[in-house]
Image (tube, rainbow, N blue to C red):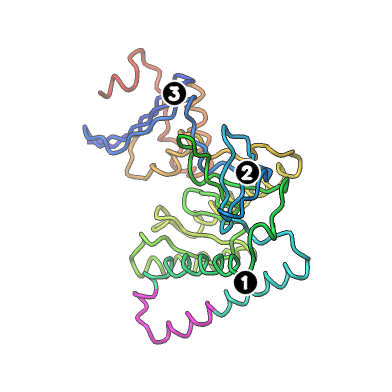
């Protein structure tokens, strides 16, 4: 039996997606116009209140409620401190990272390479968290963040009930095979779900060859495990262009403003759920079909021919019920 991706984008108020393998449903998702997700969106935002008791700030970003920004989610670039102090802070941060990599290089001579690879992502995440905690011990939010201050923030958790969205200034942009972190210097990382030693070693070499700019980080997603260097490089270059567009938009915007909207359901589905095991992609709705086809052409040109418009009288989901 063939594996199919079905996208019902015939109605503007709701989009539905299902991946079926024969008669078995593997994935299902939907997005309504009234409940579009905020997570992943990037906004030019303004600090409305600094709350010392919470060590957090409340942010006006354009949502229904003010967002919540914890102090450990604020990049040192936003600290209102003398330039010399900030430069010293960033130097210390870089020295810490260099020491960390040197220590890991020494330990890798003595430890089993398989265990070292498997633990890499955990170590990197712990290192970033440790550096953020160190910054928090050195400063209090009320000492370095000011009301009306402008920041570029990203939603990491949706609004819920009376709670506003949770925000961060450590941005990340997801592609098909990688995640670009434009203001987090974490070096080259590999998804912990990629466990094969040969794949991890090869992908490390690929990431190193991309020469990621200083101050940025790139993580290879699980979907990139078997991808070629050319495929990963194309995805990485797409993310770099996306980041440049975000920067350009930011320069011409006034807070609060939406700067970047996370891909809608059609694009997210192709980016995150599509793989070469899928034989057919049927899209109902002309606008949705063109969007899916064009996005597939950009991400995986060789697979674009699988995206086909569904134009029969019987609705797509009824036919495959």
State whether residue 200 is above or below residue 220: below
Between residues 235 and 72, which one lies in front from this camera angle? 72
Nearer the camera: disc 2 or disc 1: 2
Which residue, given by chain and number where applicable, does mark 2 sit on? Answer: 59
Going by the image, does 79 lie left or right of 175?
right
Q: Secondary structure at mark 2?
A: strand
Pointer 3 residue: 14
**Residue at the outermost front position:** 53
Q: Position of residue 266 (x, y in %)?
A: 46, 33
Sort mark 2 into few (<14), some (14-19) or many (20+) by Cα contacts within 10 Å.
many
Q: Nearer the viewer, mark 2 or mark 3?
A: 2
User: In which quarter of the view is residue 225 placed?
Assistant: bottom left
Residue 28 covered by magenta stretch:
no
- Which is more N-terminal, label 1 or label 2? 2
Residue linked to disc 1: 93
> Helix, strand or loop at disc 3?
strand
Which range is magenta?
100-116
Whether the magenta-drawn stretch holds residue 109 is answered as: yes
Mark 2–mark 3 Cα distance, whole angstroms, equals 30 Å
């Amino acid at each position: 039996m063939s594996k199919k991706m079905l996208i019902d984008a015939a109605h503007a108020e709701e989009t539905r997606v299902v991946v079926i393998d024969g008669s078995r449903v593997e994935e299902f998702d939907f997005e309504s116009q009234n409940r579009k997700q905020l997570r992943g969106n990037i906004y030019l935002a303004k600090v409305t209140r600094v709350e010392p008791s919470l060590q957090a700030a409340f942010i006006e970003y354009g949502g229904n409620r003010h967002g919540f920004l914890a102090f450990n989610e604020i990049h040192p670039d936003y600290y209102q401190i003398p330039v010399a102090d900030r430069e010293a802070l960033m130097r210390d941060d870089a020295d810490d990272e260099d020491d960390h990599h040197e220590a890991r290089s020494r330990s890798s001579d003595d430890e089993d390479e398989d265990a070292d690879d498997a633990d890499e992502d955990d170590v990197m995440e712990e290192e970033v968290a440790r550096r953020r905690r160190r910054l928090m011990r050195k400063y209090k939010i009320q000492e370095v963040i000011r009301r009306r201050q402008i920041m570029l923030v990203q939603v990491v958790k949706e609004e819920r009930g009376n709670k506003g969205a949770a925000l961060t200034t450590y941005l990340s942009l997801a592609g098909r095979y990688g995640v670009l972190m434009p203001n987090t210097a974490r070096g080259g990382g590999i998804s912990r779900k990629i466990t094969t030693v040969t794949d991890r070693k090869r992908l490390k070499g690929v990431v190193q060859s991309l020469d990621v700019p200083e101050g940025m980080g790139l993580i290879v997603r699980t979907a990139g495990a078997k991808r070629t260097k050319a495929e990963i490089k194309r995805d990485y270059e797409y993310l770099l262009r996306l980041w440049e567009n975000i920067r350009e938009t930011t320069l011409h915007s006034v807070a609060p403003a939406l700067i970047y909207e996370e891909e809608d359901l059609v694009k997210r589905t192709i980016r995150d759920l599509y793989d070469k095991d899928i034989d057919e992609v049927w899209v109902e709705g002309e606008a949705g079909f063109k969007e899916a086809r064009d996005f597939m052409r950009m991400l995986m040109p060789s697979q674009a021919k699988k995206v086909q418009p569904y134009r029969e009288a019987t609705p797509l989901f009824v036919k495959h019920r």
